[in-house]
Amino acid sequence: MFVIFKDEVIDSNDIKKIILDNSEFNILEDMSLRSKREDIVAFNMSINIDVLNEMLKDDGYDLEEENKEELLDEYMDLADTLAVELEEYMPERSILKAYAYKYDEVEDCIKLVFTMCHRELGELKLSDIVKRLLSIVG
C-alpha cells in the first residue's frame, strides 16, 4: 500500500522489506489500510520466543530460574524495544511505536503492532492509531 510521508509517497512493502532484512521479526499482516489513514504504515508482526531467549541468555538471564510471569514481561518489553530500534533503518524524520500485545503459545511467539509515520503527525496521533489497531487484533 502506498502511504503519504509528508511530501513523499512510500510503499509499505519497502518498509516491510527493511523490517525483514534488519530484524528477526515476521510480518503477519500489513495493517496500513486498516489504520484508516493514508499517512500511517502499520504491521502486525511476531518474533519467535527462541530468538528472545537467546538475547536474554546473552544478557545473563537464567531462564530456568525466572518466574513465568516475569519472563513473559521480559519477552514483551524486549519485543517492544527491538521493534522501536528499527527506527534507525526507517526513512528520515519518521517516528514509530510498537506494542507487544500477546504471547501466542501455539506459535511460540510474541505478537505486536508496529506503526510508523512522519514526525510532523506527532506521537499523540500515532499512539491513538496504535490503540485502534490493538482493538482490531486484540
Image (tube, rainbow, N blue to C red):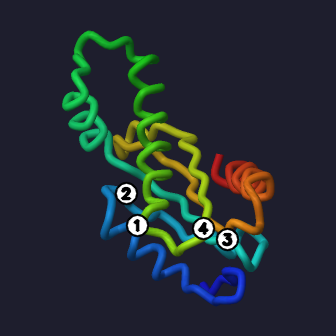
Write down the residue under mark 3. Answer: 118
Most extreme residue toward the front, as rendered? 93
Query: Distance from label 2 to label 4 (Cα)?
Result: 19 Å
Q: Is residue 28 left or right of residue 47?
A: right
Q: Residue at x 22, y 17 (%)?
A: 62
Q: Is residue 50 left or right of residue 117?
A: left
* Occupied quadrant, residue 93: bottom right
Q: Residues within 10 Å of mark 1 (few under 14, many from 20)?
A: many
- Circle 2 sits in a helix, a strand or a loop, which is it? loop
Q: Residue at x 48, y 47 (%)?
A: 111
- Residue placed most toward the observer, 47 or 118: 118
| Residue 94 circle label | 4
Amino acid type at circle 3 is His
Amino acid type at circle 4 is Ser
Write down the residue under mark 2. Answer: 25
Q: Measuring from the top left, give residue 112's x and y in whole percent.
A: 53, 49
